[in-house]
Amino acid sequence: MNELTSPHKKIGESFVSLVSIIEKLRSPGGCPWDAKQTHKSLKPNILEEVYELLEAIEKNDSQAILEELGDILLQVIFHSEIAKASREFDVQTVCEKITSKMIKRHPHVFSKNRDTFNVKKAEDVEDNWESFKRSASGQDRSIVASLPVSMPALAFAAEIKKRANRCGIPDDPAVRSMDGITQEEQVGLKLLDDVSEIIQLGIDPESALRATVTQLRDRIVTAEKLADDKPLSELSTDELKKVWIKSDPNFNS
């Protein structure tokens, strides 16, 4: 598995070339901007790149996906070079660690005893992953320990509910008493119930809401164009109603 075929060698050469470029940019005499960056200063950049990739995927735009994957790869190497400068780790360590993790998480593929693993569907693999994570970090590890609380709230809720469902934890529908809790807490409980119902339909709530909001955004842009770039806020009620109707993708004049 460690022997490189000719295509793999070309991939390796391209990867090394990109690493060399980042090294040069951050070295003395390179680019002042690249040299001064830190893990924290690049946080907005990597977040923006991830969202741009998500948008490219939503649009099914292969060229945009290609470009955004390159930008994210750049961020991985950039952060690795920053860590190397402080002698924490480097990009080779990053590659070795994720390689080891992927092999350990797929014993049904890479293990000599792979035939002993009962893996027939994707859900079986997910269960094995959770077992691996617990064994790697101790039996006290929670099933939700790997979920960062900084995730978007809707995606965070969906993943929490999915993991709870896999363990057989029953849903707690909104029949609970609303006495003594704030309006914000009531809204939160209602949203969580909605997430549970959506998951039961086999739909990802984050993707569903993103797609719908994107359609709304596109319709607003269309309405602005139909208004001849006149601010929508300056249109009369009748004018706004007309352009809004015409902005509907299903509108037939």
Image (tube, rainbow, N blue to C red):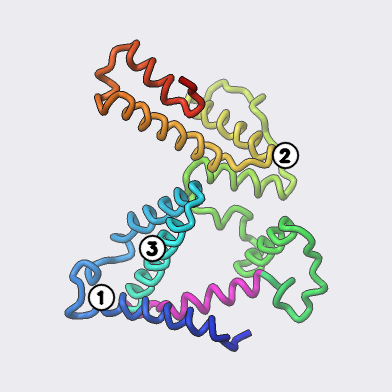
Identify the image quadrant of the N terminus.
bottom right
Q: Is residue 29 above or below residue 203?
A: below
User: Is residue 239 or residue 18 the one in the foreground?
Assistant: 239
Question: Can you tell which mark lies on residue 188?
Answer: none
Q: Residue furthest top?
A: 238
User: Is residue 85 or residue 66 the one in the foreground?
Assistant: 66
Q: Earlier in the sequence, mark 1 or mark 3?
A: 1
Q: Earlier in the sequence, mark 2 or mark 3?
A: 3
Q: Residue at x 47, y 75 (%)?
A: 94
User: Is residue 230 or residue 1 the one in the foreground?
Assistant: 230
Between circles 1 and 3, the one closer to the viewer is 3
Q: Helix, strand, or loop for circle 1? A: helix
Question: Can you tell which mark lies on residue 26?
Answer: 1
Q: Is residue 15 above or below residue 214?
A: below
Mark 2 and mark 3 residues within 8 Å of each other at the beta carbon: no
Residue on which the image places disc 3:
71
Residue on which the image places disc 2:
170
Between circles 2 and 3, the one closer to the viewer is 3
Q: Residue at x 54, y 53 (%)?
A: 147
Regarding residue 150, the answer to whether it shows in the image is no
Question: Residue 5 at what x, y percent from top left?
Answer: 57, 86
| Magenta range | 85-105
Question: Residue 131 at what x, y percent from top left?
Answer: 69, 63
Q: Residue furthest front?
A: 253
Q: CA distance from mark 2 to mark 3?
A: 41 Å
Q: Residue at x 42, y 79 (%)?
A: 14
Q: Is residue 208 above or below residue 52?
A: above
Regarding residue 236, the answer to whether it shows in the image is yes
Question: Residue 201 at what x, y percent from top left?
Answer: 69, 37
